[in-house]
Amino acid sequence: MEKLLVSRCLLGHKVRYDGGAHGPYDLLQHWQDEGRIVALCPEVAGGLPTPRPPAEIPGGQGSNVLDGNQPVLTDLGEDVTAAFVAGAEIALRLVRQHGLRVAVLKARSPSCGNSHNYDGSFSGNLVEGEGVTAALLRRNGVQVFNEQQLSEAAAELARLEQGN
Ligand code: SF4
């Protein structure tokens, strides 16, 4: 059975920066009942508390953070790059440990977002770009979906299970 990594906040765990959570999502619940899900909140795993100040990447590109070219900053300007990178590395270790090839991560998060991110101005502006964890996983061959792409993730899991 093909397993997948899932953002903990999508499973109802109150680990969002503001202490909130998301869901429930029927398909995620189904996968959890099947024992397919490896759950992680990269920011909490990286050492940040909940609740915590909101953080954004200037320019919105997690790959720039991985390459050391941009920090992750809170709205008060605190540099939280080390915790974000540590969380991404923990995600990669989990992926390798469990042989995961698919992830479903929360959209528009500076860690988990897979296609769009806030631009670092804390004004709600979105740009194309991945979060730090999403970027590291994708660099290492993981297909990263978000909670609005659950049917695509299901199709990919089925394809992998059929060995295609
Ligand atoms: Fe944690 Fe990712 Fe959810 Fe943010 S989006 S609370 S980092 S699991």
Image (tube, rainbow, N blue to C red):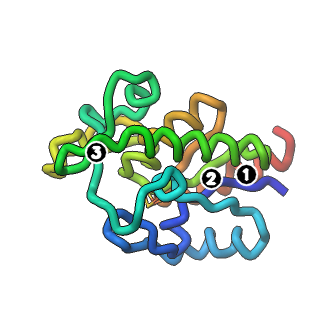
Circle 2 sits on which residue?
A: 153
Residue 19, horizontal then vertical, whole percent:
36, 72
Circle 1 sits on which residue?
A: 157
Circle 3 sits on which residue?
A: 56
Q: Secondary structure at mark 1?
A: helix
* Label total for image: 3
Q: Do the residues bearing badges 2 and 1 touch, measured as CB atoms within 8 Å?
A: yes
Q: Do the residues bearing badges 3 and 1 touch, measured as CB atoms within 8 Å?
A: no
Q: Secondary structure at mark 2?
A: helix
Residue type, label 3: Glu
Residue type, label 2: Ala
Q: Nearer the viewer, residue 78 or 11?
A: 78
Give the Cα separation between the discs numbered 2 and 1. 6 Å
Q: Residues within 10 Å of mark 2 (few under 14, many from 20)?
A: many
Q: Which mark is residue 136?
A: none
Specify which label sits upstream in the sequence, 3 or 1: 3
> On the rendered structure, is 163 left or right of 139?
right
Specify which label sits upstream in the sequence, 3 or 2: 3
> On the rendered structure, is 30 left or right of 41?
right
**Image quadrant for the C terminus?**
top right
Residue 49, horizontal then vertical, whole percent:
41, 63
> On the rendered structure, is 6 left or right of 157?
left
